[in-house]
Structures are given as C-alpha cells and as structure tokens.
C-alpha cells in the first residue's frame, strides 16, 4: 500500500493537473497489474460493497481511544469525513504491515461474510499496522466516498500518456463493463472488452455560456434554438434490444429510470440519442429538487414512480443502425431524429422543441419567459455543427435566464465538510413572515475565502449552541441570494422552493429590517 | 479574594490594576506575545518579555512606552508579583504568572509544548488557576515531531527543484515565517517578503540569530528566484507579486492543514501541518502539569475542551475572549500589518 499511499500524497500535494498526471503515469509504470486495475476501478467509482458497517468502526475507535461519544461526534463534525476522523483519532501504529493494494481489497471482499468479531480482529490489526495516511486509505477502501481530486479525464489522460492510446477510446474502455478480476490491464487499455459491450456511450458534446452579443452570432437562420432544461443530461443507447442510460457524469443509471427503458425499448432499431431526463407531471416540467428524489435509489418503487414520474426531452441523435452520425451536421441529425421519432407512441418521450424566431430581439424575450415553465433559458446550436467531443467554443452556446435575487438574513451556520472543515461555510437564510422569520434557502456557494473567514469568526462569537456542527446565530448578517427559479412547494415550511440558491453578495450595508418578506418572495413566482 | 476578573476590555488583575493582552486600550497592559490579537495599539504602558519588545515596537510604533523582563524575572506591580515563563509559541512569547499573597494565576497566552528550536521551549508552571488557550482543542490534532516536519518540507522543496519549480511558503510574518526558515535552513537560498524581512530585522536587533535570508525586491530578476525558496504572508495568495514568481509551487503552513479538506485549499498546491499552538495531547499535558484547581479555557475549542476537562475531573470554565486565530491569518489581518 506504500506506493498507493505515496501516489495519493503526490496527487494531493499539487493542484496542477500535469503534475497529477505525471504522478499517475509513474504509478502505472511500476505498480503490479492488479493494483493498477483496482486504482482505475476505485477512481471511477467501481468499488466492492462495504464489508464493515461504519457504526462498528466508530464503536471500535471509541473503545481504543477511550473517548466519549460526544467528543467523537464533535471531532467528526469538525473533519467532515468518517474515515479521516478515525484515521486521525487512532494512536500511532505499533508495527508495520506492507501489502499491495489488491491484496487489501481481496481481503476486504472476503471480510464481508465474516462475523463482527472476526471483522473487528482484522480491522484493529490493520489500523495498528498502518500510518495515518495509509489508515485513511484503508478506511476509504472499506467504504465512503474516495474523492482525491482526480477526475476521470485526468485519469484517462494519464493512461493516454502512458500507452499512447487515444483518450476517447480509453474513456470508453474505463467506463465500460469490466471488473478488476475479469480483465488484464493491457486488455482494458486496448479496449478488448468494449467491442462486445453494447453499452458503449459517446462523449457528450457540451456548451459554453454565451459570451458575445447575439448580433455577432451571424444570421438567425444558421442557428437551431431550443429550451435549456435542468435535469439529468443523459445518453440513451439501444443496441441489440438492450437499453442503457448513461449520465453526463459517465455513470450507468439505467436502473434508476425503468419507465424510460420501457418507452425507449418500444422504438425499433439500434440508436443512440442525447436528451434530458426530467421530472414531468401532467405535462409540466418540475424542478430539479423533485427529480433528485429519484436519484441514487437502490430500489425504484412504484410509489416513487407515481410520485415523481420522469420523462425524456430528446435533443439529438448520435448513432442510428450502426452508423455514427456525429460528423453529420446538426441540421441533418435533427432530420434523422424526427424520422426515428415518428414511430413513437409513448407520451413520456418528447422531442426537444425547436423554437421559431425571426430576429434576435425576439429570442431575448423568449429567454425571459423560459423560467415560467421551469426552463433554464435557451440553447443555441449552429445548424452546420458536428457533435463535438466535450466542450468546444463557438458551435453550441447556453444562454441562461438572469438569476432572481432576494435579500435574506442568515439564521444558521454549519461547518463545511471537505475543503474548509475548520470554517462555517454552509448557511441557512430566512425572510420575514410578519414579525417572525421563515427559512427560505440554504447556500454555500458565492463567497470569497476572506468573507468566509470573517463570517466564521463572527459565528464563533455570536452562536447560541456550543456543540455539534450547526450553529444558530443572531439574525444580523444580510445577504443577497441569487437563484435560478422559484416555485410553490408543500415540502418547505415557507411554502416556496428556490432552485440553485447561492450568495451573490454580502450586504453589509443592510440590516435585518431591510430583508424581503415571504409575500415579496412569493410575488416572484407569479411575476415569472 | 479574587485575583483576576474578566471584563469587556480583557483579563483584569484586580489588586495589580493591569490587564493581560487587553483588546481595548488601557493604562497598563501586560503582553504575552507580539501577535496582533494579543498586543493591540493604544495602551499607555506595555510590559512584555525582552524578545517581544522590538517586535511590538516594530508593529505598534517606536514611541510607545514599553518595558520588558527576562523569563522568570519578577516585577512587583501594586503588590502583585508578575513574571514571564516561556510559552514556546513564537519568539518572545510568554505565559504570564501572577502571584498575590501566595495565590498563583497563570495566563498561557498562546503556547505549544513541542520545541521548535527557534523560540524558548514551553515550561509548565504550577498554579492555582490556569487560563489556557484551546485553538486545537480536539483529539484529531496530533502534530508530527520537528524532525519529521523538517523532512517533509525539505523533500517538498527538493521535489520542486527537480521539477524546475520555485517553492513558495505562505506563513504569518511573526512566528510561522521564522519557523519555516528554521525548518528549511540550508536547503537553498531563502527569499522573504518585506513584511517578514522587516520583522526579522527587528528580531535580530534584540540579539536572536535567525537563518540567513534575502529580501525579495519587488523588481527581482526571475532567473535569481528560479528553483529557490520564497516565504511570504498568506495575504499575498493570488497577488501580482506571487504571480510574478517563476514556476511557483505554493504551500500553506498551518495547524489547520492537518485536516485533508483544509489542505485542498483553492489556489494552493500543498498544505503542511506546522502549528504554533499545542495539539490535543499538548493541551492536556500542559493543563495537568499546572496542577491547577481551576482552569479557564479561552479562544478556540473552549466549549469542547472545558467540557472534556470537567469529565476527567478537572474543574474548567469557558471564557469568551476576543483573541483571534493566528494559524490561518486571513487577508484582512495581513493587510493591516505594516508592509
Ligand atoms: Zn499568537
Ligand atoms: Zn492567540
């Protein structure tokens, strides 16, 4: 594990992507094959299931350290990560265990069916033979998220640098169906497994935010304009009677949307389409908050499917009957897409509407009403553009509606997990409801480090509670909160839900007297 | 009778009629060390340790009225015997011991128990009442030994040199900067920012030997700096000066860097857990060594640490103070520092 631990250190000690890639290449040059495969698996979220419950680990650490539970929890609240908290609390190791990564993982896989007592003996022995950093890795191998600042892209780029194989092909290879025990490192890189893999997706074509005047885009008839939706961008693949759904994060999410699998399965032929998975009820698109209830569920129950029905707005077609259409123009692809869609009978599949407009001014007006039906704005796609790999400037633009804003007062502050766990970074905001305050939003984005430091110091002085991660504070600090959308919501005490709220500005010039009222906030719903 | 009282202006010694590290101007201030949140401007009369004198004058002005003592050199003020004991926090940092009619109170100021080979090592002082800081008062904080830190920092510099990079450390001008200098002494030339250079000058003036450094001129030649070492205050993160440094790799040195999430700071490459405050075991040891019957816990994790002390049978009370966090000085603080 020493090499793997050194790799993690090398990656974490720099924020330069090239240095991270070099560290990975170095590791791939020297590590045993099995270790390399497990590294790729771990960094792409393919991990064995958790062999030891985190509650047991917590109990054992309290036993070893003799710390009271409240102090353990206080430590956890401050670190924000259980595996790391445990690694930090344990006393220094008494001996040294050195085993390659894949042996540790194999042992952990076997541990799953052991008794709690056997698990305890194994884990305690491991803890006592590993340095703090290795211990953290060991705990992460057992379970928990393993975020170390290496994106799939960085991983793929390092494999490309190592092997000379095309990065896109490698992306296909590593996100395809494989397990470390079913393939060799060379076969994985050479993509031996993906020719047989019907699920192979294409890289998504992504858009930049519009950064020029509309007039500079040229003639209006050179552009295809559609509404922009805030759901799960998905690539839906049907090959050889099998349907696969990939999310933009390169995850296979097929199981989460059985109704889409069924609807897409009804369409004849083999094809790959690009679209947006949205929560849609009575033909109206719901907020992302609602869709979220459908995500990352182990079981999608009938009840949940009725509560939050999903649909697909189809944007594009990338492959049809074994022909890669990505080099066809947008205009040609749209014709093909409409042709494919003719046979559709399902009402949960919809073609993304192409907006008719005569001049650019008209478009601006259309963008401004987009929010009223929960659209994020507009997408502008050059009609002669190919379906690019990744983000490419010039052919696709997203043009979002301007955010809405309200002034609200901070009422709770919470320590951030991860990046700034010593600071209060997550805040809850309220507006006036007659002579009381009512919560309207939670936000953690938008402030500078200096502001966060200043607010943290203020929270420390003005907090009512002393323990735990959440602090109630005097309602004094006023912020301008920006958000993308607003809707009535029964789930929220205030009766409204804001979409993607963040702090636009700390209004030091305002006091709690100046904040919005719940009525003025609700008025925004009707105005939009 | 009570020897001390906690007032709005700070910790007040009733018979002595003086304050300890007051946060509002008073007639007589006894100062634990030169950090901005402990030695503030506007007091009529200052008393500190010999090694803090030049630092405080440098920060607050040459014309302040300031006296100083050696460690363990008693001074009688209105019948209270005042003396300083090493706190091991930064150069010149002192615990302030007050004795009145046989009753002893010790105010720790900021302290660390682990020797750093640049400030006089911490010495526990027996007392009836102990006022302790608690910046890192959680059991997750456990510092590496100085030798291990030395290896860690020096390896980072050497690694940077292999990759043709200039190593830039960001650390508070008083304390952290000198500590970093000592930890990487001898690896290569060390360039320091004006704020640090001026402070070093003041410190050297009182006879303390510091590792050799060169002033980082604003019009430096890139070639002179390539692959070398630079130390600057954290407020300069993202500054034009930092951007001008060729192929810089940046590192923050602070106890908060012990936590992974904090190390992954925006815009910084590395984070090293180099702290000038005691870790959990250091705090516990220090408190126990005083054999105090009552402990007051100030800035940091006062709620947690005092609750824990009470649970292990040491009477402890929380004390809200206006002392800040000098381990991760924000830009706001640095900008008020004299450049
Ligand atoms: Zn200090
Ligand atoms: Zn302090």
Image (cartoon, rainbow, N blue to C red):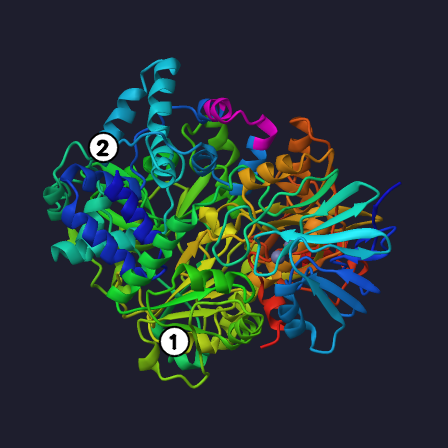
The image quadrant of residue A384 is: bottom left
Measuring from the top left, give residue A78's x and y in whole percent. Answer: 55, 42
Q: Chain of mark 2?
A: A
Q: Majority secondary structure of the magenta segment? A: helix
Q: Is residue A528 visible?
A: no
Between A208 and A137, the one nearer to me in the picture? A137
Q: Which mark is residue A474?
A: none
What count of labels does the image hold?
Answer: 2
Residue in front for this viewpoint, A341 or B244: B244
Residue visible at 64% across and 41% down?
Answer: A470
**Residue A142, percent from left and from top:** 35, 30
**Image quadrant in which you'd find residue B269:** bottom left
Ligand 2 is located in which of the four quadrants? bottom right
The C terminus of chain B - image quarter:
bottom right
Quarter of the image with the N terminus of chain B is top right
- Residue B315, percent across and down? 73, 31
- Specify whether disc 1 shares its chain with disc 2: no
**Which chain is disc 1 placed on?**
B
Residue B53 at x, y = what percent?
66, 68
Q: Secondary structure at mark 2?
A: loop
Residue A250 as seen in the image, left or right of residue A289: left
The answer, for residue A190, to whether it is visible in the render is: yes
Magenta residues, start to end: A59-71
The residue that label 2 is drawn on is A99
Rounded to the nearest angstrom, the CA distance separating label 1 from label 2 is: 42 Å
Q: Nearer the viewer, residue A183 or A273?
A: A183
Picture disc at residue B245: 1
**Residue A353 falls inside the magenta stretch:** no
Is label 1 in a helix, a strand or a loop?
Answer: loop
Residue A279's place in the image compared with B68, above or below, is above
Q: Up-down: is A223 above or below A478?
A: below
Give left or right: position of B225 versus A375: left
């Amino acid at each position: 594990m020493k090499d793997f631990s050194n790799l993690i250190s090398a990656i974490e000690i720099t924020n330069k992507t090239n240095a991270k890639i070099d560290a990975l290449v170095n590791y791939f040059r020297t590590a045993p094959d099995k270790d390399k495969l497990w590294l790729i698996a771990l960094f792409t979220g393919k991990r064995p299931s958790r062999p030891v419950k985190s509650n047991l680990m917590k109990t054992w650490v309290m036993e070893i350290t003799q710390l009271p539970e409240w102090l353990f929890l206080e430590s956890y609240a401050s670190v924000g990560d259980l595996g790391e908290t445990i690694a930090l609390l344990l006393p220094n190791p008494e001996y040294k265990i050195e085993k390659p990564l894949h042996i540790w993982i194999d042992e952990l896989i076997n541990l799953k069916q052991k008794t709690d007592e056997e698990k305890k003996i194994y884990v305690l022995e491991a803890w006592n033979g590993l340095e703090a950093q290795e211990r953290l890795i060991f705990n992460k191998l057992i379970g928990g998220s393993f975020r170390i600042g290496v994106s799939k892209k960085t991983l793929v780029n390092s494999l490309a640098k190592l092997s000379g194989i095309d990065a896109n092909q490698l992306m296909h290879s590593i996100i395809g169906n494989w397990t470390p025990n079913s393939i060799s490192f060379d076969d994985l890189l050479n993509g031996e497994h993906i020719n047989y893999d019907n699920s192979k997706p294409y890289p998504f074509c992504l858009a930049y935010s519009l950064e020029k005047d509309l007039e500079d885009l040229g003639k209006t008839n050179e552009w295809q304009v559609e509404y922009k939706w805030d759901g799960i961008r998905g690539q839906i693949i049907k090959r050889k009677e099998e349907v696969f759904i990939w999310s933009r994060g390169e995850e296979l999410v097929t199981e989460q949307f059985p109704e889409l699998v069924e609807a897409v399965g009804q369409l004849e032929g083999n094809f790959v389409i690009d679209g947006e998975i949205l929560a849609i009820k009575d033909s109206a698109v719901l907020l992302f908050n609602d869709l979220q209830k459908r995500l990352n569920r182990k079981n999608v129950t009938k009840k949940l499917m009725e509560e939050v029905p999903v649909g697909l707005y189809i944007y594009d077609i990338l492959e049809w009957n074994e022909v890669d259409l990505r080099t066809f123009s947008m205009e040609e692809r749209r014709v093909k897409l409409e042709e494919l869609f003719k046979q559709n009978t399902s009402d949960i599949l919809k073609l993304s509407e192409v907006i008719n407009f005569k001049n650019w001014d008209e478009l601006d007006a259309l963008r401004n009403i987009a929010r009223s039906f929960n659209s994020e704005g507009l997408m502008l796609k050059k009609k002669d553009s190919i379906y690019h790999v990744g983000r490419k400037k010039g052919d696709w633009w997203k043009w979002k509606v301007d955010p809405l804003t309200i002034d609200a007062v901070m009422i709770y502050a919470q320590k951030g997990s991860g990046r700034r766990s010593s600071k209060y970074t997550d805040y809850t905001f309220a507006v006036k409801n007659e002579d009381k305050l009512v919560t309207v939003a939670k936000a953690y984005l938008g402030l500078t480090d200096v502001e966060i430091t200043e607010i943290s110091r203020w929270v420390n002085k003005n907090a009512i509670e002393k323990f735990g991660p959440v602090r109630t504070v005097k309602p004094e600090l006023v912020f301008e909160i920006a958000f993308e959308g607003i809707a009535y919501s029964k789930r929220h005490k205030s009766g409204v839900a804001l979409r993607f709220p963040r702090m636009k500005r700390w209004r030091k010039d305002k006091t709690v007297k100046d904040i919005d009222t719940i009525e003025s906030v609700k008025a925004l719903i009707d105005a939009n | 009778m009570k020897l001390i009282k906690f007032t709005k202006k700070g910790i007040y010694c009733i018979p002595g009629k003086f304050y300890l590290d007051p946060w509002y101007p008073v007639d007589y201030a006894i100062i634990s060390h030169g950090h901005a949140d402990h030695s503030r401007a506007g007091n009529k009369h200052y008393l500190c340790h010999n090694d803090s004198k030049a630092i405080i004058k440098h920060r607050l002005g040459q014309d302040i009225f300031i006296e100083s003592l050696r460690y363990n050199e008693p001074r009688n003020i209105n019948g209270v015997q005042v003396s300083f004991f090493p706190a091991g926090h930064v150069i010149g940092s002192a615990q302030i011991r007050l004795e009145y009619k046989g009753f002893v109170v010790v105010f720790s100021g900021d302290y660390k128990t682990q020797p750093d080979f640049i400030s006089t090592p911490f010495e526990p002082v027996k007392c009836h009442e102990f006022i302790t800081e608690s910046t890192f008062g959680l059991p997750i904080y456990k510092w590496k030994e100085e030798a291990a830190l030395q290896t860690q920092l020096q390896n980072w510099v050497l690694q940077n040199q292999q990759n043709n990079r200039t190593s830039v450390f960001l650390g508070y001008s008083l304390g952290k900067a000198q500590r970093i200098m000592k930890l990487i002494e001898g690896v290569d030339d060390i360039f320091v920012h004006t704020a640090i250079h001026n402070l070093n000058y003041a410190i050297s003036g009182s006879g303390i030997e510091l590792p050799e450094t060169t002033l980082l001129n604003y019009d430096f030649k890139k070639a002179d700096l390539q692959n070398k070492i630079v130390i600057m205050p954290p407020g300069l993160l993202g500054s034009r000066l930092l951007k001008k440094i060729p192929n810089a790799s940046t590192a923050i040195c602070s106890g908060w860097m012990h936590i992974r999430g904090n190390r992954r700071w925006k815009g910084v490459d590395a984070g090293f857990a180099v702290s000038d405050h005691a870790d959990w075991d250091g705090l516990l040891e220090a408190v126990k060594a005083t054999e105090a019957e009552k402990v007051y816990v100030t800035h940091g994790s006062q709620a947690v640490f005092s609750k824990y002390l009470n649970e292990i049978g040491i009477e402890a009370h929380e004390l809200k103070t206006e002392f800040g966090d000098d381990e991760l000085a924000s830009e706001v603080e640095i900008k008020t520092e004299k450049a």
